[in-house]
Amino acid sequence: MKVWMVMVLMAGFAASVQAHHHESKFTDYVNPWIGTGGHGHVFLGANVPFGMIQLGPTEQTKGWDWCSGYHISDSLLIGFGHMHLSGTGIGDLGDVAFLPVSHCCRTEAKFSHANETVRPGYYAIRLQEPNVFVELTATKRVGFHRYSFGADVNRAMMRIDLKQGIGWDHVAESSIKQEGPTLITGFRRSEGWAKNQHVFFAAEFSTPVKIKKQQGDTIMVVTIEDVSKPVLVKCALSASSIDDAKANMKAELPGWDFKATVAAAAAAWNEELGKIAVDTEDDTIRTIFYTAMYHTMTAPSVFCDVTGNYRGADGKVYKGDFTNYTTFSLWDTYRAVHPLMSLIHQEKQKDMAETFMHIFEQQGKLPVWHLMGNETDCMVGNPGAVVLADMVLKGFVDDKEAAFKALKTSAMLDERGMNLLKEYDYLPYDKDSTFETVAKGLEYALADDGIAKVAKLLGKKDDYKYFFNRSRSYKHYFDKKTGFMRGLGSDGKFREPFNPFNTIHRQDDYTEGNAWQYTWLVPHDVHGLVSLFGGEKQFVEKFDSLFIVSGDMGAEASPDISGLIGSYAHGNEPSHHIIYMYNYIGQPWKAAKLLRQTMKELYFNDYDGLSGNEDVGQMSAWYVLSSIGLYQVEPAGGKFVISMRLR
């Protein structure tokens, strides 16, 4: 497969390739169904790249595989919600749902997947009861609906539901009212994974509606008298106010041209997908590649209004002169999504950095896993520091001193085990009641390496020495006797008993993994890790066996440990750099063989086309970078390993 990308040049970093547009319609090779089955958890519906709106079908939440609100195994709709997550392991959002109904008491609709159509920027489905053809598209901040009712429908009804949500989400406070013959406005505050989420909306119909039934402040059913022509609905969202939602609608979708809006959404996708052009005779590979690119651009999503207003991490509304973003699955995405963005979405990097800095100012630390203005503190380590350090080192941050302050402050807090790190230089398992000390310690070490590099760039010798030494604290967890990273107690002894295969989900020394997978989580100092084994020969012997050995992980193992090649677990993010470590020991041919095997055996053009959760683009970003023969193993600094291309 030949690959062309736009020219990339940045401070201290360069990748030069030829700009080329081999395909005029890259969207033709996107299959949004990939990942809607198995444990992919991807969003299915209509959106534009990095848009606030993800408008699509929401099904009844029936368990873990409905984190996005949709799974291919289901056939019961409860609404078309305007916000969805993609690929997460926790469910939330589903906000402001519309559903055409045949009776004011109906709350769901059966459907067939055979009656669904989806492509970038467009989703459609034919429902039987009522007889209606539903079409959805979107701008960044506005969802656009078109309902074409059958000739047998004399008067239609629409259910507007502020109560329903996905997964952990539940409504805490809401309001809904009719402001005029065609205008419905409201507010929804919910609690869930995002502990305090605010959504304001303004929904305008193309024809007058009347309230048929209202259930408190959460549900309204309206009748639509004139269904002789398609009924259009524009629903704008804001996290700031109803007035801002109205301003978003006026700015982004003042008219009623549904077809033109669909075309504009497709054009936006085509432009972004066209940043990388591939030349291959295999259309299946092409489809997997462009679908992967597509999946990397659902989030981070715009989280501000056209007025500049946005809701900050402290819950207050601010006025900004930058584009504020949200949905930062950083424990996942620092590994490949953000390095990929630094290549093909350079125009967004300064706004991303601004977002990070404002989050720091508002909550006192860099984001960990940020969702709709809320810090969830999900997963371990300081991944926000990794991403910000990388942006500084690549020249995307103007105020480097302020960025370093954010990096240092975030790394010197006493929360999430960092107090123990400062006291012991590692995290003793018997002092940390929340488990996962090996995973935390290794993640803190790689983040500290990025902070050290920024300190060195700024000439801060003492800070550089401190964080460099902390970045090498990973060595404490290495047991030379067994050759594994292990839980270490405050007495300096490793935890017993020890089984490198066995794992208990989030209740042992690792995070969604075992000792076989976590021993290699030293991407910032691969040669240092090699030396712990006693040299390359000993390292290679153990490393080769990773891709061969397998054992009983136990009944309580995390479902995230998937996509196994031996004990290498591609379905979960801590493994994503591992294959490339062969390049550091002079054996790139082994990496090439395993990379091809992973891409061919663990990515498919099918519903169950991913080996694990999409995780907000990370699973797909690994495929995109690996396909073109680049991967940033060291989390911060822009050093890309050059490897084989997918052929």
Image (cartoon, helix red, strand yellow):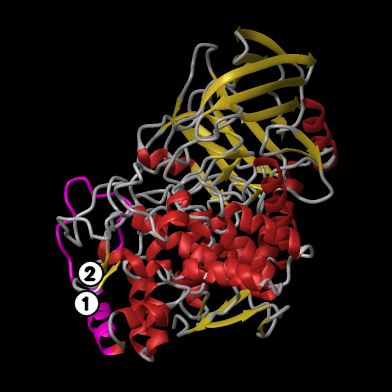
> Mark 2 vs mark 1: which is more N-terminal?
1
Residue 179 placement, left or right of 71: right
Residue 31 seen in this snapshot: no
Q: Is residue 559 magenta?
A: yes
Q: Is residue 550 magenta?
A: yes
Residue visible at 26% across and 66% down in the picture: 516
Residue 12 seen in this snapshot: yes
Local crowd at mark 1 within 10 Å, few (<14), some, or many (≥20)? some
Q: Is residue 553 above or below residue 56?
A: below
Image position, residue 570 (x, y; %): 35, 64
- What is the C-alpha distance between the residues marked 2 and 1? 8 Å
Residue span colored magenta:
537-563
Query: Dot 1 corresponds to which residue?
Result: 545
Quadrant of res 185: top right
Query: Dot 2 corresponds to which residue?
Result: 566
Q: Residue furthest bottom?
A: 586
Residue visible at 45% across and 60% down in the picture: 443
Quadrant of res 405: bottom right
Residue 8 placement, left or right of 484: right
Image position, residue 444 (x, y; %): 47, 60
